Amino acid sequence: MTAPTTFHADAEWARAQDAADPLHALRDAFLIPPHAGGEQTYLVGNSLGLQPRGVRQALLDELDDWAHLGVEGHLHARHPWLPYHREVRDGLAEVVGAEPIEVVAMNTLTANLHLLMVSFYRPTPERHAILIERHAFPSDRDLAASQIRFHGYDPAEALIEVDPDEASATLSLAAIERALGEHGQRVALVLLPGVQYLTGQAFELAEITRLAHAAGCRVGFDCAHAAGNIDLALHDSGCDFAAWCSYKYLNAGPGAVAGAFVHARHAHAELPRFEGWWGRNQATRFEMRPEFDPAPGAEAWQLSNPPILALAPLRASLQLFQRAGMAALRKKSCRLTAYLAWLIETRLGDTLEILTPDEPERRGAQLSIRVRAGRDAGKSLFDHLVAHGVLGDWREPDVLRIAPAPMYNTFSDCLRFADAAIAWRGAAA
């Protein structure tokens, strides 16, 4: 799609952009919630992605195979259950920029981070701190603090939180570098997000990894808001590990099976880990040996059989990602978010403030917005949007998150958000 030289705030222009979008047909692959006899303007894929139409049939296929085959479904189902996790492996690898051996679908996000930290957070009396960002998502802070306590240290001393140093509470690479310069000799692990949940800031994974490794630290990323959203390039970043959920931009359903990444350089390393049945090498698993023979790569971190009924929606969603391609999705996403930002700045700049960085490479689909009049006005705007069928999400104390997901959102969706916000402003005047 050729980018126009200018944007326009009118419905005809937005419809023309949507019609020219080579990915526009993907919208029909999703079930969009209804509102007032039409479709909701759903701008909250950063919280829960929409249901792909193919999910229902994918689940019915597995239920039918279970009914007709019983235990034989492990080998003879349409998608055999024994290697089912590999049905999604290549698709996940493409989405997060990894080699297939580096990824596995398993568990949920925080469980995966804990399991990976068993291997990559190895504290010593001299080096036992974990470095995170101030205002990290609460579960990330919880897991870091609990890991520190589990190893016998005190989070008050060993949990280092880097303060934002830019306008709108974003965090510069220089701030991370300064923190490592000051504390690096006692940091065992750097644990940061791919995209910060509250501000929508995308982090420079390769540069953070370079700085952390130079300071002697292991580094991992929580990619909950990044997987399926930005060009992660996890392999090229060189990070040691990462994990993500699959219910946001990956559209795999509420509580969906999450993903994990372990860099290829660790694929055959003798690392400490919690071990379980499905982490054994598939070639020898059913020989029932007493010793643990780990699968190569990220699969060694599996504990239990893959949950087939939970993986089926992820398989259906990843087929759409493979159909579209991450490069094309990211290109569209940059244009959609730029249009949304332009609408806010030109039509609502006196009312709304964008917290997310301006540079496309420093943000994904999400824009985090504050109402300049304060928290009560912000909540009033959110409630007005919901009542008029425009759904974003609200994060206390005063942030409205709006995320035009390129899989199914449109220029027209962005314009409807702006028009609804303008109507609220007029009613509130």
Image (cartoon, rainbow, N blue to C red):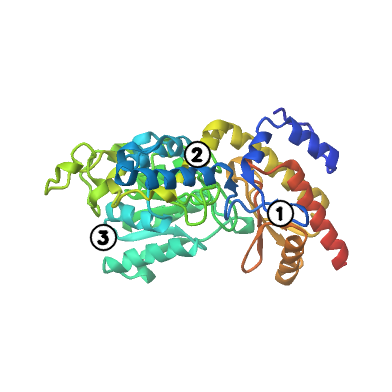
Instruction: For marks 3 and 1, give the CA distance.
Output: 57 Å
Amino acid, disc 2: Leu
Task: In this rendered view, identify the residue nearer to me: 290 or 11.
Answer: 290
**In terms of secondary structure, where does tag 1 sit?**
strand
Task: In this rendered view, identify the residue nearer to me: 191 or 15.
Answer: 15
**Among all residues in the image, which is located at the extreme left?**
290
Q: Is residue 243 visible?
A: no
Q: Is residue 22 left or right of residue 185?
A: right
Amino acid, disc 1: Pro
**In terms of secondary structure, where does tag 2 sit?**
helix
Quadrant of the rendering where the C terminus is positioned: bottom right
Task: Identify residue for label 3.
Answer: 126
Q: Is residue 382 left or right of residue 366?
A: right
The local crowd at label 2, few if under 14, some if 14 to 19, many if 20 or more residues have their Cα within 10 Å, is many
Q: Measured from the top left, where is residue 224 in percent x and y?
A: 49, 51
Count of numbered tags: 3
The local crowd at label 1, few if under 14, some if 14 to 19, many if 20 or more residues have their Cα within 10 Å, is few
- The nearer-to-camera label among 3 and 1 is 1
Question: Mark 2 near mark 1, Cβ–Cβ under 8 Å?
Answer: no
The local crowd at label 3, few if under 14, some if 14 to 19, many if 20 or more residues have their Cα within 10 Å, is few
Q: Measured from the top left, where is residue 148 in percent x and y?
A: 32, 65
Task: Identify residue for label 1.
Answer: 34
Q: Residue at x 38, y 71 (%)?
A: 156
Task: Identify residue for label 2.
Answer: 318
Q: Is residue 340 left or right of residue 211?
A: right
Quadrant of the rendering where the N terminus is positioned: top right
Amino acid, disc 3: Glu
Q: Is residue 70 visible?
A: yes
Mark 2 or 3 closer to N-term? 3
Mark 3 or 1 closer to N-term? 1
Kindly indicate the quadrant of the structure image that contains residue 391.
bottom right
Q: Residue at x 72, y 27 (%)?
A: 2
